[in-house]
Image (tube, rainbow, N blue to C red):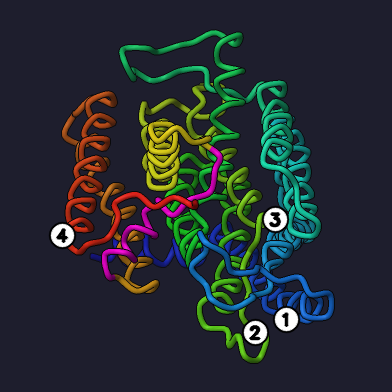
Amino acid sequence: MKNTMKDELQLMVDPLYLYDSVALIASFACGLLTIPVVLDFCRERGLFDIPNFRKVHKKAIPRLGGVVFVPSMIVGMFIVMEMFQLSGQQAMSFSLWTLYFLLGLFAIYFTGLVDDLTGLRARTKLLIQLLAAVVLPLSGLYINDLQGFLGIHEIPFWLGAPLTTVVVAFICNSINLIDGIDGLCAGLTLTALGGFYCAFKDWGLDVYCVLIAALIGVLVAYLYFNLFGDETKNRKIFMGDTGSLSLGFLLAFLGLKLSMVNDSIVSFDGNGLLISFTLLIVPVFDVFRVALVRIRNHRSPMAPDKNHIHHKLMRAGLSQAQALVAILALAVGYILLNLLLQHIGVQLTAIVCADIVIYTALHLGLDALLRRKGQPAQLFED
């Protein structure tokens, strides 16, 4: 009992957890202070998200909330680095991967900003996402092992590099397109970040834990305005493409870092790819399913519609808040299920197949419910 209490006390006073907390609090404060400024700027310049066929909201809402995400995260990390230096401890090291990641992140960030301010074609955004994603394998960070999925293990650079580029761009779009109701994109991102934080902390990669903590802080501040802001007082905001694309790239980078097999940095434990896949499963599955539905109906996979999971749940009778809770519960359910299956020795391929079957059954059941309620299972813009 005494040893347990001692361990808990050690955890509470561990400087590394203190630094994570400082990064989170600093980023949270930065978000709380800057988002009202952004709201006033949007009102003065008329930068609103206008309702249309595929959008749930009925009033024009400011759309630049995501502008504060990356700067607030950097502020939180910078303060922690200064604390490290002042305390005389060994400074946190940044690899070439980190520098290339920042290069790609800024490209994605400014792409989203331009899109929010003036608008960009979907193909233009996709091209920039692919170019930003390419810098990661060029730095040596790429999918180099499928860890037994479909019986495949180590893969060469010439195959892993293009695979990585496509996967990163796909995750960026998945996070971007799941941003359809209040709190959903940020809520799913926070769920994933919690999982990544635990994994990186377990691996002893503390610089990534500081990054994650800083991102969590500003997302909590954003959710305060997004979920509880009074739109009549110009205190409600959306993250826009600046936010969702940046979050997508950040999550893709973290997932890639966790999935790559590199024994010189951390001992491989065989479940990095499973954890990354599981933490991103809901947005990835949703966008993949929607793209297949569009293709099956002879439409462009990038054409807008109202067939995302939140659209279907709301047609089934759920409110925005209820749909949000249901989707977050689904994400947490997948995490618990996949960790249980991995714990009892189920192979990665079988786990992925089980996940697909569950998701397919969920939507088949939801489609049947919609038909009984006289609602269309699929809804496209005319």
Lower sequence index among marks 4 and 3: 3
Give the residue pinned by disc 3. Answer: 242
Classify mark 3: helix, strand or loop: helix
Graded by Cα atoms within 10 Å as few (under 14), some (14 to 19) or many (20 or more), the crowding at tag 2 reads: some
Residue holding disc 4: 372
Mark 1 element type: helix
Measured Cα–Cα span from mark 1 to mark 4? 45 Å
Q: Please name which of the two marks, 4 or 3, marks the residue nearer to the observer.
A: 4
**How far separated are the C-alphas under marks 3 and 1?**
17 Å
Q: Which residue is mark 1?
A: 36
Q: Amino acid at mark 1?
A: Pro
Q: If you read the primary sequence from the N terminus, does the residue marked by circle 1 or circle 4 appear first?
A: 1
**In the image, which is nearer the foreground, mark 2 or mark 1?**
2
Q: Is residue 360 magenta?
A: no
Q: Are marks 2 and 1 in contact (CB under 8 Å)?
A: yes
Q: Residues within 10 Å of mark 3 (few under 14, many from 20)?
A: many
Q: What is the quadrant of residue 38 in the picture?
A: bottom right
Q: Could you tell me residue 23's position as x and y percent? A: 65, 63
The first of marks 3 and 1 along the sequence is 1
Tell me the element at label 4.
helix
Q: Is residue 122 above or below residue 20?
A: above
Quarter of the image where one finds residue 232? bottom right
Mark nearest the camera among 4 and 2 is 4
Q: Amino acid at mark 3?
A: Thr
> What separation in Å lies between label 2 and label 1 (alpha carbons)?
7 Å
At a point 72% along the width and 33% down the height, the residue shown is 132
